Every structure is written in C-alpha cells, then in structure tokens.
Amino acid sequence: MPHDTTLIGTIVAGLGFAFLMGAIAQRLRISPIAGYLLAGVIVGPFTPGFVADTGLAMQLAEIGVILLMFGVGLHFSLKDLLSVRRIAVPGAIVQMAVASGLGIALGLWLGWSFAGSAIFGLALSVASTVVLLRALQARDMVETERGRIAVGWLIVEDLAMVLALVLLPALFGAREEAAGGAALLQSAGWVMLKVVAFVAFMFVVAKRILPSVLHWVAHTGSRELFRLSVLAIALGVAFGAAVVFDVSFALGAFFAGMILGETQLSRRAAEETLPLRDAFAVLFFVSVGMLFDPWVLVDQPLPVIATVAIIVVGKSLAAYWIVRAFGHEQQTAMTVSVSLAQIGEFSFILAGLGVGLAVLPETGRDLILAGSLLSILVNPILFGLAVKRLRSEDEAGAAEPAAAAAEPAPPLRTVLIGYGRVGSHIGSLVCGRGEALTVIEDQKDMAAAAEKAGAKVIIGDAAKESVLRQAQVETASTLLIAIPEGVEAGAIVRKARAMNPGLLIVARAHSEEEVDDLVRRGADHVVMAERVTAARMAERAMLAKG
C-alpha cells in the first residue's frame, strides 16, 4: 500500500468483528457486550489470524472511556440518587466492601501483594452500568422502585470508582521516588487538592461558560455545529483536566457531562453524541478483549471459577441480604442482586491502571477479563430465572391493573407514541377534543409534559409488545405514531396491527420509502411532512395570486 493504514485497519477490524460477534450474541439473546469482548479476543495477539495494533486500539479505547463517562455524567441525576439514598449509599458501600474482601482473600491466596489484591477485589466489586441499564430497559424496569434502587446503587459505585481512579496513581505512582507512609499521604493529599481545585473550577467557571456556549451554538440552528460543540466540550474538558489538573480523563469527562446534564439541552446533547459514543464504546470493549489471554481458562481454571463465583454468587448474595436488611421486599432484593452479578467498564479501567502501575499482576487482569466475559454471558440467564421466580408474586400486584384493563374502554381512546415537537401538538389537539389520550414516551421530561397536559403516560419503548399492551392498544380506537424513526415506527405498526386488526393507525414518515414500508406493514394513513408542507405553500401562493 502507498501509505500506512494501521489505524484504518484497526478500526475496520475492530468494528467489523464486533458487528459479527455482537449480531451472533444478539441472536443468542446474550448481551452484545460479550460479543464485542470476544471480537477483541479474535483480533488480539493471543489468537491466530489477523492481529490489530494493540497500542492504537488502546488509544481509541481512551476516547471510548471519555465518551462513556461523559454519557454517565449527562444522565447523572442527583434527584434520583437522593430518592433512594437510604438504601443505595450504605448498600453499595457495604456490598463493595464484601466483594473487595473476597477478592483480597483470593489474591492473597494466589500469592499477590496486598495492594494488588485490593485492586483486584475493588475491580470485582463494581458492576457495569451499561449492562445493568440494558437489562432493566429490556424488561421495562427502569422506572420501577427496583430499577431506581439498582441505578442509584450503580451511581454510588461509579462515584467510588472515579475516586479510586484518582487516588491510585497518587498512592502507587510515587512509591519508587519516596518511601514511607508520610510521603504517600502527602502525594495523595496533593492529588486531592488538585481534584478539589478542578471541581471548584468546573462548578464556578465551567458551569457558567459551557452551558452558555452550548445555548449559543443551539441558536445558530446548525445541527452539525451543535454536535461538534458537544464533542469538543467532552474531549476538551477531559484532556484539559488531565493536563492542567493532573486528574483522569474519566473524571474530567464525567464532570463535563454532569454540568451539561443540568441544562435544557442535555437530552439533545445525549442524542447527538449517542452514535459516536456507541461506536467508540464498542472499540473500548474490543480493545479490552484484545488484552485477554484465553489460555488463562486452561492454565488457571480454579482461580477463574473462584473469580466468577465472587462476581455472580458472593457479590449478589451480599446485595440481596443488604436490601432485605433494610426492609425491602424480596422482589426488590432479587432484582438488585441479579443486576449486580456482572462486572464491566470500570473494572477494565481499574485493571489496566493496576497493571500499568506494576501493582496488579497481569494474571489478575486476565482473571478480571475472564470474570467479566463469563458473568456477562451468565447475567441474562440469571435475570430470566429471577423474573420467572418472581412472576407468581407479581400476579397479586398485577391484579388491579388487570381488572382495570377488563373495564370497557371509552368510546374514543387514542394512543400517541412520542411527545416531542410533533407529538406535543397532536396531544394538545386530541385532549382539546375531550378524548382519552394515552402517551407512550421514553424520555422523562417529555413524559412529564404529557402528564401535565392531562394524558395518561406510559414510560417505555413503544417497539416492545409489553409496552403496547400496557397502553391497552388492543382496546384503543386510534394509534398515532409521531416519532421520526421510520424503522422503529414500522415495527410498532406491525405489532399494533397484529394486536388490534380494527385499529386506525396514522404514522409519520420522512421519505417515499418510509411511506411505502409503513403502508405495507399495516398503517392506514401515513403523513409525510414534505408533502404537507409543499401542499400548504402551494395553496398559500395560489391564494395570494387570486
């Protein structure tokens, strides 16, 4: 080739194999993250065939870490955390202590230093926010009390990990130059001072500047410029935090996301950066898989089994009994415990940091990666078993909704999907006619606006049959689909038509192809904005001439 294409080859191989393995994992009803990790193993140096550049992959992974943490900050809700603080804060701390203790015991048994064992145990104690949220969303449990406790629990764990990522380099990075506990405490204190200065800068200076910049860009009307500004803020703050304040990329990105998360443009910022965040998050998991040596499963089967047991059994049992001890019912305890029966992105970052500081043996990183792969593979199975176990107990609580569903529906009842710019206008017109309106929306702010307008609101993904049944589509007279995503709208039309053959379905489209697809799937009427706009403009022009 005329020029070096190592970077292109690494990205193509990473995304290509990630797509292939992720699709297989999705087909097998396994978390796609497991497929991404296995894709990394395939292109890694420990397996035959094509070998991607590990150094470049790790640099791309750093961008993935920044964008992942930026996304966590965007969705960080202090209000949600405070609502479950009485159980989430002490529960997460005690559970992490128990899991860390088990990990330390295993590390010492394997002959590692106490410091290495402590990092190993801490890595096993924190679950993956990505895996947990996907599991809860797949079962429409995010908005339930059980879901809020699990998410609040994970937020506490994430904050603890952010603190650990800051302190570890201070505690172990300077041990070659200085000896004694006083020197380490001095180093840790200096880093904490920098962290405090960084936090003060973010809340005093950046909190005033960044939202203003974002609002100014939004008013320009350029979607491309807005997307670019969000990425520049995320990457720029993360890099600046590392260079100026000597803190981690992760911490800088987290605070940048949290500050923007308090603005009215947070939802748009999250939507605009989601594709890039997903792409680099995939490369992050692939790069982690590249570090995994599969031979650890053969060379050290007992340590691998013990690691998985700590993650799946020890950590889950600790969480279960903690939740029960705080007086919550068995359903909540099982949901939280199963949610935590896996480890993910923070564990990888911590393992890499421990190896980089020469504190954690490379074997420890391999065990963490093996534990992550196996726990992510097992987690959906455990979630399914837990749901089946609790189904009989849920029947009693579902008796009242079932009775309500049995009541005769109003003569005219409309289900509206999406309460954005188009949906909110539709909702106002329907409610103004006095019709009963049920809105399906997955964004909290829009759902709150619909509820304020007088509609019954179902929070969830309308593409799922369970959500459509919760909205009682089978007894509705009209279904209005106001979301702009044509593929998702087509799936909704097909499922709704199968549930209610006599339902009047009106959908929204943005192209001739989408119109044909929606009609083919069962929509009665499809409104294409461009057609309506053209017709009205031509009509106005004719009236003006007449």
Image (cartoon, rainbow, N blue to C red):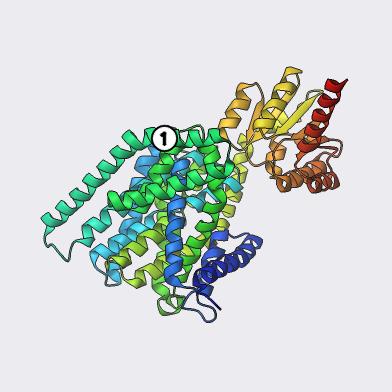
**What residue is drawn where x is 69% and y is 31%?**
422
From this viewpoint, is residue 97 visible? no
Q: Position of residue 159 (x, y in %)?
A: 36, 46
Q: On the picture, is 389 further left or further right than 66? A: right
Query: Dividing the picture into quarters, in which one does residue 141 lie?
Result: top right
Q: Residue farthest to the bottom?
A: 48
**Measured along the vertical axis of the image, is residue 426 above or below residue 492?**
above
Q: Amino acid at mark 1?
A: Leu
Q: On the picture, is 417 further left or further right than 163? A: right
Q: Position of residue 206 (x, y in %)?
A: 36, 37
Q: On the picture, is 443 further left or further right than 166? A: right
Q: Nearer the viewer, residue 215 or 287?
A: 215
Q: Nearer the viewer, residue 155 or 67?
A: 67
Q: Position of residue 495 (x, y in %)?
A: 77, 45
Q: Nearer the viewer, residue 448 or 212?
A: 212
**What residue is drawn where x is 40% and y is 65%?**
368
Q: Position of residue 510 (x, y in %)?
A: 75, 42
Q: Quadrant of the N terminus?
A: bottom right
Q: Quadrant of the C terminus?
A: top right
Q: Secondary structure at mark 1?
A: helix
From this viewpoint, is residue 480 visible? yes
Q: On the picture, is 63 further left or further right than 97? A: right
Q: Nearer the viewer, residue 442 or 118?
A: 442
Query: Dividing the picture into quarters, in which one does residue 537 lie?
Result: top right
**What residue is drawn where x is 22% and y is 61%?**
172
State the count of labels. Answer: 1
Provide the residue designation for mark 1: 78
